[in-house]
Image (tube, coloured by chain):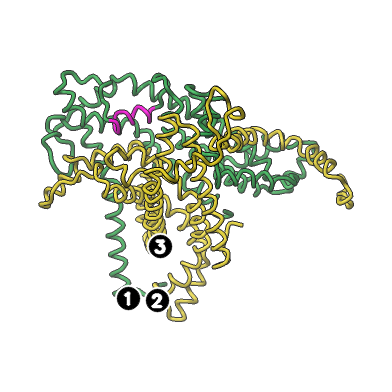
């Protein structure tokens, strides 16, 4: 085995790079495809995002398109829809987080109390299933069940109520979106919490038992602190995607009648950019979105690091 | 042992009832669709309320769906994307995960950071769209594979499990003259079959269910994957490609056609799921323990 260099600080940067490349030449070979992928499909678009500051036309290419600075950003900020888009995006994301994030945690806590292993396994198997069904199928079912003569309205009629045109009513959009998201993800989301809970040492519970703590106290003081690191990490990751989360589902479920509450920043970018080919404008909106996202992740991570000991880095 | 006080017993019973209720709500929509797909279209239209079994029995809907060439072409395209995509994703992700798990790579933290950063910031949809077009992938099925080939979460999970390989194995192999490529192919991969299987499933399901990339990158209908055809039928309410006979028949059958289409396209998942479920769960565990 080669003797480790004890004078590495004397080596120049170039020499260290050469050494790294030589020692790990096969590793770099293995890494190459993925590296190429990230450069091509993640970093090159970041470079291309500058069209948000230019009056881009495909004929001219990026660099020859005239620089217009913040013109398109201003156009967005002063546009008629700006307020609505921000409100819709924030409301949908925040409410989805508020209702959707605790649900799997609660399910994990409840499943943890089940003593019959067979029953627990059956419940788990069944509740994981919706996660694997495609979004198109789920939304197809939603649209079918909630139409005016669909199953949901038939049930409402049976109880004497008036049929509701769910998917054409702006006021119902968020409710349908969030409740069906919970339906789809509650089972799968509980896995990670359950596995964390199962790694909490049993003697902690036994000691608490001996001190006279009931199950509720045990849950509050042992189980919850045990899964707090997991909750924190997942929460930070979730907040980081807050502004772009779930636009595929919105695209499948919304229509012009529900734009008022359903149209979010990402779907707006899709319509103006992909459908309308307004590349510079929608790139500006999209960039704004990404920057907010980044800011949120950093902020939440910072706050979490201050408040508790848990953070991503 | 937790004392079985009456309060505790009551809680356990309520808990069990709630969980059973949850299972029913989870399964019932799928059961409803299943029953409705086998129902007679005419009776289905008149029926109100929940379904506990098919209304009448008819294979009309399935006949109509089976005869729709778009559905079968869609299936074919999806299979192409799933098989090739999963293979490429698996291979490239495993290779990178291995490289980034080697202690000899001093720069591994740097590259991990580059990759993780992309989870937090991106150039946006439009710049990516333009890149895909400029590369020449527009209107090809490769646009459904290459731009989404690597998933950072999966990469992290694989890297974690590759890190678990005993250093002694690697060292003795190196003494025998093996380089990293050989160690990767002959030692790492065979030992990590479980992780590979799980990743195969994760990527596979993701490719199977994806539709958005196809909707923005594809123009030729012959290339549409199954989910896109489904979107036409289920979301955009366009069953015109189905041959249902007269217009009146068409409307009646339209309902049950949708249900039959859902069943036909979700069948693989529904059938394979019970068998593969424990592998999916394992994947989350692998990532969670060190995560």
The chain that hosts pointer 1 is: B
Tell me whether circle 3 and circle 2 mark residues in contact (CB < 8 Å).
no
For the point 40% across and 24% down, the residue is B224
Q: Is residue B209 visible?
A: no
Identify the image quadrant of the C terminus of chain A.
Answer: bottom right
Chain letter of the yellow region: A
Residue B19, image x, y percentages: 31, 57
Secondary structure under badge 3? helix
Which residue in the structure is indicated by mark 1?
Answer: B5
Identify the image quadrant of the N terminus of chain A.
Answer: top right
The chain that hosts pointer 2 is: A
Residue A11, image x, y percentages: 87, 46
The chain that hosts pointer 3 is: A
Q: Which residues are the magenta region?
A: B226-236
Which residue in the structure is indicated by mark 3?
Answer: A109
Whichever of callouts 3 and 2 sits on the residue coming sooner in the sequence is 3
| Left or right: B269 in relation to B135 | left
**Magenta-drawn stretch contains B243:** no
Chain letter of the green region: B
On screen, residue B81 above or below A148: above
Which residue in the structure is indicated by mark 2?
Answer: A214
Instruction: Depth check: give the residue in front, A143 or B47.
Output: A143
- Crowding around mark 2 (Cα neighbors within 10 Å: few <14, some 14 to 19, many 20+) is some
Write down the quadrant of residue A14 in the picture: top right
Q: CA distance from mark 1 to mark 2?
A: 10 Å
- Crowding around mark 3 (Cα neighbors within 10 Å: few <14, some 14 to 19, many 20+) is some
Q: CA distance from mark 3 to mark 2?
A: 15 Å
* Mark in the foreground, 1 or 3: 3
- Crowding around mark 1 (Cα neighbors within 10 Å: few <14, some 14 to 19, many 20+) is few
Secondary structure under badge 1? loop
**Magenta-drawn stretch contains B234:** yes
């Amino acid at each position: 085995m080669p003797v480790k260099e004890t004078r590495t600080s004397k080596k120049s940067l170039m020499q260290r790079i050469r050494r790294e490349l030589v020692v790990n030449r096969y590793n770099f070979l293995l890494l190459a495809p993925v590296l190429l992928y990230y450069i091509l499909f993640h970093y090159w678009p970041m470079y291309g995002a500058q069209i948000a500051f230019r009056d881009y036309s495909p004929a001219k290419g990026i660099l020859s398109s005239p620089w217009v600075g913040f013109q398109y950003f201003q156009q967005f900020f002063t546009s008629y829809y700006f307020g609505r888009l921000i409100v819709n995006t924030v409301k949908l994301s925040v409410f989805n987080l508020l209702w959707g994030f605790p649900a799997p945690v609660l399910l994990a806590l409840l499943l943890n109390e089940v003593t019959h292993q067979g029953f627990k396994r059956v419940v788990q198997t069944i509740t994981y299933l919706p996660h694997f069904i495609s979004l198109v199928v789920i939304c197809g079912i939603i649209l079918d069940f909630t139409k005016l003569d669909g199953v949901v309205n038939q049930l409402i009629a049976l109880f004497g109520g008036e049929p509701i045109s769910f998917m054409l009513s702006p006021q119902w959009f968020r409710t349908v979106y969030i409740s069906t998201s919970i339906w789809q993800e509650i089972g799968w989301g509980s896995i990670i919490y359950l596995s964390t809970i199962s790694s909490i040492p049993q003697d902690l519970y036994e000691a608490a038992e001996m001190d006279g703590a009931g199950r509720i106290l045990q849950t509050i003081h042992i189980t919850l602190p045990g899964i707090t690191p997991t909750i924190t990490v997942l929460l930070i990751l979730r907040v980081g995607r807050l502004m772009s989360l779930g636009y595929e589902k919105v695209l499948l479920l919304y229509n012009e009648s529900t734009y008022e509450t359903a149209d979010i920043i990402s779907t707006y970018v899709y319509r103006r950019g992909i459908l309308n080919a307004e590349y510079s404008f929608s790139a500006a909106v999209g960039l704004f979105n990404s920057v907010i996202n980044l800011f949120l992740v950093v902020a939440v991570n910072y706050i979490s690091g201050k408040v508790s000991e848990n953070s991503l880095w | 042992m937790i004392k079985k006080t009456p309060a505790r017993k009551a809680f356990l019973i309520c808990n069990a009832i709630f969980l059973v209720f949850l299972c029913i709500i989870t399964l019932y929509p799928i059961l409803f669709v299943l029953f409705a797909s086998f129902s007679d279209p005419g009776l289905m239209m008149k029926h109100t309320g929940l379904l506990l079994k098919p209304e009448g029995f008819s294979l009309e809907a399935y006949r109509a769906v089976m005869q729709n060439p778009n559905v079968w072409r869609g299936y074919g395209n999806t299979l192409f994307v799933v098989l090739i995509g999963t293979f490429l994703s698996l291979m490239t992700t495993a290779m990178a995960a291995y490289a980034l798990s080697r202690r000899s790579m001093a720069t591994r933290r740097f590259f991990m950071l580059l990759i993780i950063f992309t989870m937090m910031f991106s150039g946006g949809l439009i710049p990516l769209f333009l890149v895909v077009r400029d590369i020449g992938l527009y209107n090809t099925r490769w646009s459904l594979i290459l731009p989404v080939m690597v998933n950072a979460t999966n990469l992290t999970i694989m890297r974690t499990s590759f890190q678990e390989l005993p250093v002694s194995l690697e060292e003795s192999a190196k003494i025998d003259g093996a380089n990293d490529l050989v160690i990767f192919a002959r030692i790492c991969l065979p030992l990590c079959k479980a992780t590979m299987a799980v990743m195969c499933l994760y990527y596979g399901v993701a490719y199977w269910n994806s539709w958005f990339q196809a909707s923005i990158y594809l123009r030729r209908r012959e290339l549409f994957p199954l989910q896109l055809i489904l979107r036409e039928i289920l979301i955009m309410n366009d069953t015109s490609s189905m041959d249902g006979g007269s217009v009146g028949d068409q409307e009646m059958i339209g309902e049950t056609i949708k249900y039959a289409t859902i069943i036909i396209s979700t069948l693989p998942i529904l059938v394979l799921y019970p068998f593969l479920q424990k592998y999916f769960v394992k994947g989350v565990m692998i990532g969670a323990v060190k995560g």
